[in-house]
Amino acid sequence: MLVQTTISSLALAGTVSSTLAARSPFKWGSCGFDGEAGATVKYECSNFTVPLDYLDSAANKTLNLQVTRVPAVNGDSQGSIFFNFGGPGSGARKTLVDKAEQLLVITEGKYDLVGWDPRGVATTSPFKCYGDAERPVVMQRHRVNDAFGPEDRTALARMWASAGNVANDCLNSKEQTSEMGELIGTGYLARDLMRLNDALEGPDSLLNYWGISYGTILGTTVAAMFPDRMGRVMLDGNVNVPQWYNGYDTIWWSDVDNAVFDYFDRCVKAGPGLCPLAARNESADVLTKNLYGLMDELRRLPIPLGGATVMDASAFKLVFRAVLYGNTLWPTFATILNELFKPADQHNLKAISSIWLPVVKATDTMGSLKDESLFGIYCSDKNTRTDSFEDIFAVSEELKRVSKALGEVHNNLVYLCARWPFHAKGGWESSWNETIETANPMLFVGPRYDPVTPISNAYNNSGVFLGSGVLTHGGIGHGVTSHPSLCTAKAIRAYFRHGELPAEDLNCTADHDAFDTSKTWKDSYLPELSWE
C-alpha cells in the first residue's frame, strides 16, 4: 500500500505562518559555551518558540527551543542541514559545535549546520522526575541489577519493582507538571523540527536532515508525517523503527556479539604494538571465549578495586558496551583485559584500578539512566505496556538469546518502559508495514560492526521509504563518523550536494586500523575533501 497522506492542518503539521515567524524571530548571539572565544569554527545561538501542545491550541502555552547554528564557510549558504545526534535525551547544541569542523568538511562547507536541544532535553525544559541530589541515588539503584540474566529471577523481580517505583515517582513528581510526560514524544519533536525548518528556510521548504541513532527515529517519523517536505534526509546508525514504537528493541543487540568478536579479531591483526592483548598470541576465538569466562567469573565473584569501587559483571558490561561505541578507548580496554585474563591470584589490582577508574569516568556508565529525559521520551513513544512480570521476564530471556555478551544491559529500560505511565500525544500511528513515497529519496547508512544498531536496521527502514538507498560503512562504532572513511564521506557529500544515492554495491571501508588512535578524521578526509 502506498502512503502519501500528510498532516496538513497547521495545528498538527507544525508549519509556520509568516505571522508567527514575525512574532518569533531568531536573534543570534553568543552561546555561552566554554572555550567559545577560541573556537575553530564560528557558531551562534538563539531560541525559537513553538506550541507546548500541538493538539491543544486553546491552552496557548509555548516552549522555547534552544538552537545553535554553524554558518556555511564555503561561499553563500545553500540552506540548512538539521542535526540530531541521538539519545533521546542528548542535546545537540554543544555536540554540533564539537563536531562542526568534521561535518563542515563532509558537507563541503556549503550549508548552515543547525542543532537544537529538543523539548524535554538539556536546555529546553528538561524532563525531570527527581531533584539533583536525589537523581543519582535513584538511578544507580535501578541500574545495578541490569546485567543479571534470565537465570536470576530474584534480581529481575527486584528490578521490576524498582521500575514501578521510578514510574510512579515520575507520574507524581513535583519537578514538573504531569502533562509534560505526554508532550515530549517524537511526534511533537517532528513538528518542532518542521517549524524550525520553515522559520529558517521559508514556509513549505524542503527539509535537509542528518539523524544519528535516535535521530533516525526522529528522521523516519518526520518523513512519514511530512513525506512531501523531505529534501536530503540521511539517517545514520539506524534504530529499527517498528520495534521502537511497537516492541522492546531486542533487535538492537543482534550484532553485538559479532562486534565483540570483531574487536578481538582486529586486535590480533593489529599486533601487540597497537593492541596489548595481542601479546598473548591467542586467536580471536580464544580471546572471545576468555571474555565470556571473565563475565561469568565477575558475576560469581566481583573484584574489589579499593574504596567503594567494585568491578562486577554489571559494571564491566556497561563499560565494554560504551567502549565499543568508538575506538578511542580500544587499546586502553585491551590493557585491562590483558590483566583480567590472567588467573585471579595473579591480578595486579593496583594496576587494574589505575586504568579502570579513568575508563569508567570516560564512558559515563550511568548511560541511559544519568537523567530522565532519555527514558521519558523513549518510553512515552512506546505502545508496549504490561502489568505482568512473567511477560517482561520473557523479554529478558529473548535479550539473552539475542546477545550472550551484552543483551542483558537493556533490561533496565525494558522494565521501566513496560510500567511507564505516560503515552506520547500526537505520535505517528502505524505498523510501519506500508510503503511511503517521499519528495526526494532518503539515504540510510551505518557501520558494519555497530554495537547497538545493526546494519540490518538500515535495510529494514529503507524498505519503508520508496526509492531510498543504503550505504554500508565497513568500520566499527556507533555511526559512520566513529571510524572515518574517505569513501563514506564522499558518498555523503554527493548525497547532500547533488542528491546522488551511492551505487547499490558500494561498500566503503575505514581508512585506518581501529586500534590506531593516533589517526583522526583529518587523516582520512584531507586534503582530498578540502575546497581551498
Image (spheres, grey):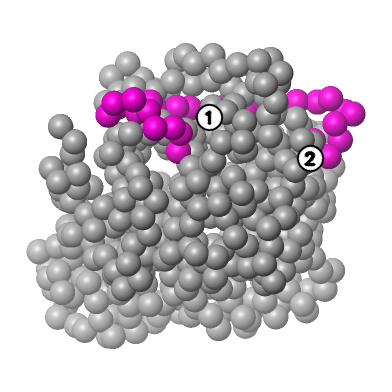
Quarter of the image that includes the C terminus:
top left
Q: Are marks 2 and 1 in contact (CB under 8 Å)?
A: no
Whether the magenta-drawn stretch holds residue 357 is answered as no
Residue 113, image x, y percentages: 42, 34
Residue 191, image x, y percentages: 68, 40
Front residue (pair 286, 178): 178
Label 2: state its secondary structure: loop
Task: Give the residue displayed 60% in from the left and 16% down from the top.
Answer: 25
Front residue (pair 265, 318): 265
- Residue 261 to residue 170: above or below: below
Could you classify mark 1 by the number of other residues whose Cα lies within 10 Å: few (under 14), some (14-19), or many (20 or more)?
some
Residue 375, image x, y percentages: 66, 51
Task: Give the residue displayed 70% in from the left and 26% down from the top.
Answer: 17
Where does label 2 land, which residue? Answer: 9
Magenta range is 53-81
| Amino acid on which the number 1 mark rests in the picture | Glu
Q: How far, Cα to Cα, is label 2 from label 1?
A: 20 Å
Please indicate, yes or no, whether residue 406 appears anywhere in the rendered image: no
Where does label 1 land, which residue? Answer: 201
- Residue 36 to residue 450: above or below: above
Could you classify mark 2 by the number of other residues whose Cα lies within 10 Å: few (under 14), some (14-19), or many (20 or more)?
few
Whether the magenta-drawn stretch holds residue 60 is answered as yes
| Amino acid on which the number 2 mark rests in the picture | Ser
